[in-house]
Amino acid sequence: MKPKAGLSRGAGCPGHVGWLVRTGQVLKTNDGQPVEVMELRHTKDGAILSEWARHFRNQYCADSQIDALRQGTKYSRSEYLREIKFPDEHARPGPSIRAGDFGEILVADYLEYCLGYTLPRWRYNDKSTRDESTRGTDVIGFKILDSGINDPNDALALFETKAQLTRSTPNRRLQDAVDGSAKDEVRKAESLNAIKQRFLDRNQFAEMKMVERFQNPEDFPYSEVYGAVALLSSAVYDVNAVCQTTTTSHPRAGDLTLLVIHGPDLMELVRELYRRAADEADAEIQ
């Protein structure tokens, strides 16, 4: 598993990842930590939006399983997704859950396609209640440089993501992400065990071994990368709010990556992705 670099599209990389752009802007938190600022420069490119919607839909329900899952109900594919799988479009807390899921999935895509991590992708598929946030670390990624060798440069990434996509007073969402990330060191062992259990349930034994690589850092050390990400609509992106963030209470502040991603009209983009993901399921799935 060799790392990929940059934000350019490679083979198998979804087109929407190319809309993530490094601005070159680096802010400083209240305690002097750097914060990279990126933009999500999305357009109305129908082909890329449909590709993204398909990718998005498969986070909640594999296309190969949707017909079996909806069997016994009265629902079409699109109705099943809207009524059972996707967070509610209108009733609270559905819209905020949609925004949070969108942010986590985008950060997972960034880690996988831009930074070369391997990520389990069943977090939303396994939800028992559609209008609830999933518990535990938001995004966990694994990077093994050479299989069979416990290289100390192998890396485990644990990222927390907070979103604010509606037009209102800017909130300190980066601080919220930092505070959430501060808990990840304590819950790391539980999170890894939960991932390993799910791989075992799926008879994915090679993936189980990948997780095992990161369960004993005392005897087999590796690099840990903690991350806190704020995903914001540009209307509520506020430099002062970002710079008020402090990492002083984070136990791994020296290993903490801070990132802000903002873009125009992101809640409208979220609605469009969920709409396409449902509507196009009826025509696309063979």
Image: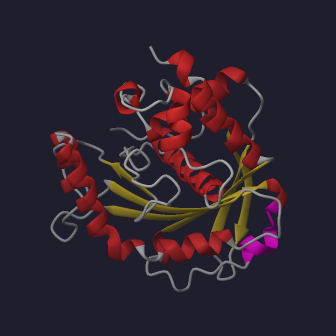
On screen, residue 192 versus residue 126, left or right, reads left
> Which portion, as a residue range, is magenta?
236-243
Q: Residue furthest top?
A: 286
Above or below 43: residue 286? above
User: Could you tell me how many numbered marks the image carries?
Assistant: 0
On screen, residue 246 versus residue 132, left or right, reads right
Above or below 44: residue 166? below
The colour style of the image is: secondary structure
Residue 78: percent from the left, percent from the top?
A: 55, 29
Observer-nearest of 98 and 75: 75
* Residue 273 sits inside the magenta stretch: no
Instruction: Give the residue at x 46% y 41%.
Output: 60
Above or below 285: residue 129? below
Instruction: Give the residue at x 37% y 44%.
Output: 118
Instruction: Give the residue at x 28% y 54%.
Output: 195
Residue 9: tell me if it is visible.
no
Q: Residue furthest bottom?
A: 249
Observer-nearest of 104 and 223: 104
Residue 174, picture quadrant: bottom right
Residue 246: percent from the left, percent from the top?
A: 63, 81
Residue 268, picture quadrant: top right
Observer-nearest of 179 and 94: 94
Quadrant where the N terminus is found in the figure: top left
Quadrant where the C terminus is found in the figure: top left
Instruction: Give the residue at x 40% y 50%.
Output: 123
Residue 126: percent from the left, percent from the top?
A: 37, 49
Please name the predominant secondary structure of the magenta segment in the image: helix
Residue 271: tell me if it is visible.
yes
Residue 114: percent from the left, percent from the top?
A: 52, 41
On screen, residue 46 versus residue 218, left or right, reads right
Above or below 88: residue 177? below
